[in-house]
Image: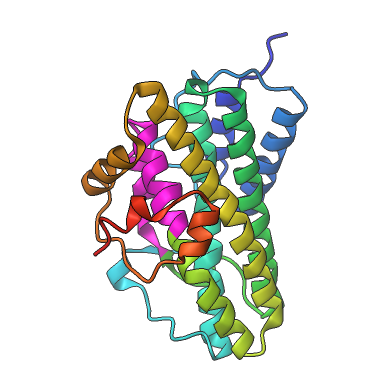
Amino acid sequence: MTMQSLGEAARAVLLTPDPHDKRRAARSLARAWRQGRLDHRCDTPMPDQPAWPAAPELLEPGRMPRRGKGGSERGRIALLHALAHIEFVAIDLAVDLIGRFGDQFPREFVDDWIGVAADEAMHFALLDRRLRALGSHYGALPAHAGLWEAAQITADDVLARLAIVPMVLEARGLDVTPPTIDRFQGAGDEASAKILSRIFNDEIRHVRAGTVWFGWMCDERGFNAVETWHALVKARFRGPLKAPFNDSARHDAGLTQEYYAVIAS
């Protein structure tokens, strides 16, 4: 019997619409890979768009309701819901990266990004559980429609994907999460703050995986990593890189100032 390929297993996760089924499918994918039950082949085409549930309603950024500063319970629920949606889409982003580009790299690349996908699934579960404890749930509010756009505009090149998703979008999370944790703590919501602290620490590792494998592929292609990153961000990322930056967390992730300080707005 032929062993299932990594690409087939990744596609199956992407085509799972229910958030909790998708979360479980991502964890199962990670387990199957670690147990040696998947062949390191990525010759199955990935879908242009993953399967997602009917709720939340997805809105363009300009139509999203304002969330406030997170002091009221309503504001905190809205913020947690927005973060849950980011983590839900991040499952698909990690799995698509593996299924689309995994055979261009050694097994260690897949090891790293399988770990990222499993982390994102766990983060989503933690945030949805917290929403339920506050009387809400994922899907109860509208969510940002544009998050998958980064995958669509980088589907042709793994260097572009790594430059934009972990090294710009996830790195932005390193900048904004500590003040968000402070806001939750200021509101006396230690339970939510603790979840965000865990996510923050994991995201440092995710950005590091992006930076390391971006550098690896630049070496393979004979490119200068920093110059290549600047060119790709200018060409593929809509909008400026905004300060303030969490320089210490970015440094821990291997994303040094020579990358982002030069082209920040």
Q: Who's the residue at 69% across and 46% down the image?
A: 24
Q: Is residue 143 above or below residue 171?
A: below
- Tell me which segment is drawn in magenta: 144-171
Q: Who's the residue at 37% across and 47% down the image?
A: 164
Q: Is residue 157 magenta?
A: yes
Q: Percent from the top left, x then y, of residue 200?
A: 59, 63
Question: Quadrant of residue 221 in the image?
Answer: top left
Q: Is residue 113 visible?
A: yes
Q: Is residue 246 above or below residue 105?
A: below
Where, quadrant-wise, is the C terminus in this rendering? bottom left
Q: Percent from the top left, x then y, of residue 165?
A: 42, 48
* Along the viewing direction, whichever of 220 and 233 lies nearer the viewer: 220
Most prominent secondary structure in the magenta stretch? Answer: helix
Q: Is residue 203 above or below residue 132?
A: above
Where, quadrant-wise, is the N terminus in this rendering? top right
Specify whether 123 is left or right of 261.
right
Q: Is residue 23 magenta?
A: no
Q: Percent from the top left, x then y, of residue 9?
A: 61, 29
